[in-house]
Image: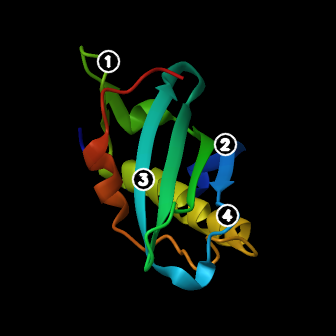
Amino acid sequence: MEAKKIQPEKITLREFRLVKGLIDSPFDFKVSEIKSFDFKVDFKTGFNMEEDLIKADFIINVSTISNEPVTEATCVYHFVFLFHVVSLSEHTSLAEDQSIDWNPYLANAIASITYSTSRGILISRFQGTVMKDFILPVVDPNSLWSQQPALPKV
């Protein structure tokens, strides 16, 4: 597929949903004992070529790492973003195994918007909680695509 630059105005965020938002913190957990955080991000996409839609699922699991041996605080958040891309078929092609070959500019844009929006939402959601000092680090959005399985249809 030829990599054509995508015009940002052709991408519209149609819908956002907070599917899951859970922070689990034992009553006797001490925020002052947190020395760091461990986290794992899961990013998956699906598509509907007929309607020019891309669905992006962003799931993050965070746990504290404390100085004292305690039951750590954990959280899981699952966000779903639904994007409309004008003439999506011009920027993607469907392989026989139902996987999709993405224009790298479109892939970067979808990953960037999903990750950075999720990052901002998490900063807001974590205020006043045991996770208040966790900030999702800045990453290369292209790295999110390395874990992509064959893509389901939306």
C-alpha distance separating marks 2 and 4: 13 Å
* Disc assigned to residue 41: 3
Count residues near mark 1 (Cα–Cα under 10 Å), then give few for <14, some for 14-19, many for 20+. few
Q: Nearer the viewer, residue 40 or 49?
A: 40
Tell me how far mark 3 sits from mark 4, CA to CA.
Answer: 15 Å
Position of residue 59 relative to residue 73, above or below, is: above
Q: Quadrant of the C terminus?
A: top right
Give the residue type at disc 1: Gln
Point out the tag, 4 or 1, that comes first from the N-terminus.
1
* Residue 115 spot, x, y in % from top left: 50, 59
Q: Position of residue 141 (x, y in %)?
A: 37, 61
Among numbered discs 3 and 1, the one appearing first in the sequence:
3
Q: Residue at x 58, y 55 (%)?
A: 75
Is 86 located above or below residue 135 in the figure?
A: above
Looking at the rendered image, the disc whose residue lies closer to the viewer, 4 or 1, is 4
Residue 5 placement: quadrant = bottom left
Q: In front here: 150 or 103?
A: 150
Tell me the tag on residue 20. 2
